[in-house]
Structure formats: C-alpha cells, structure tokens
Image: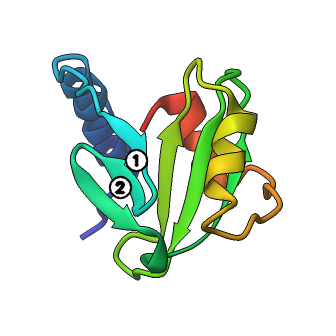
Amino acid sequence: MNIKPIPHIVIIGAGFVYLKGYIQPKTLHYGITQQGIVVNNRLYPYNLLESFWIHQPIHGYYELVVLSQKTTMTELRVPLGEKNPEMIHDIVVQHLPVEEDPEESFADILHRVVGI
C-alpha cells in the first residue's frame, strides 16, 4: 500500500494551528531568590542548575536561559520583559557560572517564527 504522508502532515498542521487559536495563554509568574529560580511557585534550586546566559531574541525582549542538570528538563527560559537584564545577570552570577550565548538553534527559530 502506498501512503503519501504530505496530506496527513498538512491536515495535522492545520488542525494544530486551528486549535492553537482557541487555547488561552497562561500567565506565568517568575522570581529569582537566594535559593534558586521560581516559576509559578516551583523552585528550581541553584544546586540543580548548571549555568546561565542572558539572550536577546530577534523580537527584542531579553530572556534568562538557565541550563539544568536534569535530563527531563535541560533548559529553563525566563522572559525578562521590561526588567533590567544587567541587574538579573548580577544577581544570578552570584550563584551560577555564565556561558556565552550560543547561536540561535533551529528549535529557537521555529519557536520564534511559528510560535510552537
């Protein structure tokens, strides 16, 4: 049997885009404490994190990118919005080593362009 995957991929993609329009985005709350980074009341302690950098994506807002030692969650991205990235850097560098901001990966480009 000769199955052509392209129509299936297009249908699934169209369904995904359709459903994405109906899902309301969640507002996440972030914080940086002396113990670690908090996302929606969940603490990620510094001793389970490896390093960090401040990234400025194309759309202009900075984000704090933290690498984790966990294999299930390798990266934590915290949008900084209007926060001062230098101030965030000065706080986090007291607890984690800084890495150089790598070039944008294919996944980063896909996220920025398509929003997935």
**How many residues crowd mark 2 within 10 Å: few (<14), some (14–19), many (20+)?**
few
Closer to us: mark 1 or mark 2?
Answer: 1
The residue to which callout 1 is attached is: 6
**Above-or-below relation of 59 to 115:** above
Q: Is residue 74 left or right of residue 87?
A: left
Amino acid type at image mark 1? Ile
Counting from the top left corner in percent of width and height, residue 39 is at 32, 47
**Above-or-below relation of 84 to 90:** above
Quarter of the image with the N terminus is bottom left
Counting from the top left corner in percent of width and height, residue 90 is at 71, 48
Q: Is residue 82 left or right of residue 42?
A: right
Amino acid type at image mark 2? Lys
* Residue in the picture at 36% in, 55% down: 5
The residue to which callout 2 is attached is: 4
Using the rendered image of the protein, determine whether residue 48 is visible from the camera's viewpoint: yes
Q: Please name whichever residue, 100 or 89, is drawn nearer the observer in this view of the structure.
A: 89
Residue 46 is tagged as none
Q: Residue furthest front?
A: 34
Q: Is residue 20 left or right of residue 90?
A: left
Counting from the top left corner in percent of width and height, residue 86 is at 75, 36
Residue 2: quarter of image: bottom left
